[in-house]
Image (cartoon, rainbow, N blue to C red):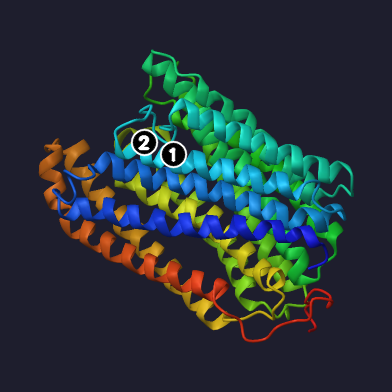
């Protein structure tokens, strides 16, 4: 660890992993309700469980992004974090807002918009916390070196904050509401968050492959251009059935098809740099998560997204379990795996130890990723059956759910394995380490 203030990232990683575990708990509770419909129906109805599950995903990923930024920014900017105390304070604010929103859901206090259910006070506190984070990290960058990595990262984070402001606009007209709602949900995960993903991926590849920074930065600019070009107008594939003009069907179909390209570029980018580099970095687990993220993101966000993005296909599949299959694998590959990869890379240096518990960490990778793949296939098959029975044959919705019971049981089983793997990962990175590194030693390198 070159810079003392990189340790600011540690509490962010700890909070993120605690919320990650809690998100899986709520996910298991929601999956159980598909198998046993009356499961916790009085204590915590399904819509509350599901809301808690999806909101925790967004909150812990944002905290994870913040931790990743605080870790890499000093190295990229060659400058200490402007104000570590401000970072700790804004983490506390963000955690309070997230916890307060989660508790409010249990009492039925929410705004009712999917992913944006947070009460108004929580949205305000989240906004204040995020602006404090952007001020802190932007000033750190402006006072130091500016690289493609930290500039692309900050561009993605600033755009995420800008589009978040649409969360405060809640029109009464449902079609108008959905029109602007997607400016947050879609443009975040299929637009500006891709910039964050590309920057973090580029940083890890620079650190672990030994490839020249100039080569990686050229790739990074290409990926960013593709992501913004396809992602912004690709929002149109959400406008098919909400009362918008008909021209959104060709626009949405064309540009959402092009959204596959930046994810494919990231796969080529990651594996080409791995092949071109020395490939002997001691932190094998971090490299596994990095390459896995690029590959799974391509299939989850790219291939599974493409499967039902064209309007004449989406007409039948919209809102079925196929959507759930795509969402689970896309979020896992593009963002969850990458944050876990940065944590795997950073924690040995934050704790001043050699890469440790790597075998357990890699077992966590394979179990969690295999379980997510099995869950995706399970939900995909369930969605195909659901589409045929409901949209083609016209069967009653609840009758169809009985036909899907086996798929729901398998989905619940895979969720248990995801939870086990998550606990393995958390133990691997936070458990007592065997081999300490002197505080004065330089960072680990590929040759050590």
Residue 302 percent across, percent down from the top left: 51, 50
CB within 8 Å, label 2 to label 1:
yes
Q: Looking at the picture, does residue 447 appear above or below residue 138? A: below
Quarter location, residue 433? bottom right
Res 362 seen here: yes
Q: Residue at x 77, y 58 (%)?
A: 5
User: Residue 100: which numbered mark, if any?
Assistant: 1
Q: Residue at x 39, y 29 (%)?
A: 113
**How much space separates mark 2 and mark 1, taking CA atoms?**
6 Å
Q: Nearer the viewer, residue 107 or 326?
A: 107
State the count of labels. Answer: 2
Residue 249 percent across, percent down from the top left: 46, 26
Farthest residue, direction bottom? 434
Q: Residue at x 54, y 83 (%)?
A: 359
Residue 138 percent across, percent down from the top left: 78, 40
Q: Looking at the picture, does residue 49 appear above or below residue 298? A: above
Q: Is residue 175 left or right of residue 355?
A: left
Res 197 seen here: no
């Amino acid at each position: 660890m070159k810079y003392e203030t990189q340790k600011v990232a540690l509490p962010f990683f700890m909070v993120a992993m605690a919320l990650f575990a809690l998100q899986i708990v709520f996910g298991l509770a929601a999956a159980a309700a598909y198998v046993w419909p009356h499961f916790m129906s009085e204590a915590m109805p399904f819509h509350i469980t599901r809301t808690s599950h999806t909101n925790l995903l967004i909150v812990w990923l944002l905290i994870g992004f913040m931790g990743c930024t605080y870790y890499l920014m000093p190295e990229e900017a060659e400058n200490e974090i402007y104000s570590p105390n401000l970072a700790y304070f804004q983490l506390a604010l963000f955690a309070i807002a997230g916890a307060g929103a989660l508790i409010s859901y249990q009492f039925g206090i929410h705004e009712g918009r999917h992913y944006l259910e947070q009460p108004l006070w929580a949205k305000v506190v989240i906004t204040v916390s995020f602006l404090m984070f952007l001020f802190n990290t932007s000033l750190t960058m402006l006072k130091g070196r500016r690289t493609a990595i930290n500039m692309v990262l900050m561009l993605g984070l600033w755009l995420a904050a800008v589009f978040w402001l649409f969360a405060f606009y809640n029109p009464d007209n449902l079609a108008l509401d959905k029109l602007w709602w997607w400016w947050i949900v879609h443009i975040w995960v299929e637009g500006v968050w891709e910039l964050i993903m590309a920057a973090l991926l580029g940083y890890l590849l620079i650190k672990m492959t030994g490839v020249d920074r100039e080569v990686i930065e050229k790739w990074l600019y290409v990926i960013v251009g593709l992501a913004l070009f396809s992602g912004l107008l690709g929002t149109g594939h959400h406008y098919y059935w909400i009362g918008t003009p008909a021209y959104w069907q060709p626009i949405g179909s064309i540009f959402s098809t092009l959204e596959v390209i930046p994810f494919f570029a990231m796969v080529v980018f990651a594996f080409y740099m791995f092949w071109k580099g020395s490939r002997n970095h001691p932190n094998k687990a971090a490299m596994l998560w990095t390459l896995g993220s690029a590959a799974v993101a391509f299939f989850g966000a790219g291939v599974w997204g493409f499967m039902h993005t064209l309007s004449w296909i989406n007409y039948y599949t919209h809102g079925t379990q196929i959507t759930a299959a795509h969402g689970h694998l896309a979020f896992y590959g593009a963002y969850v795996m990458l944050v876990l990869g940065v944590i795997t890379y950073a924690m040995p240096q934050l704790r001043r130890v050699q890469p440790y518990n790597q075998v357990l960490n890699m077992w966590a990778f394979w179990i969690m990723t295999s379980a997510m793949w099995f869950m995706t296939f399970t939900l995909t098959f369930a969605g195909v059956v659901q589409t045929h029975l409901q949209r083609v044959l016209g069967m009653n919705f609840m009758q169809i759910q009985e036909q899907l019971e086996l798929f729901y049981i398998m989905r619940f089983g895979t969720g248990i394995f995801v939870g086990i793997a998550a606990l393995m990962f958390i133990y691997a990175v936070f458990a007592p380490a065997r081999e300490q590194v002197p505080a004065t030693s330089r960072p680990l390198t590929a040759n050590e």
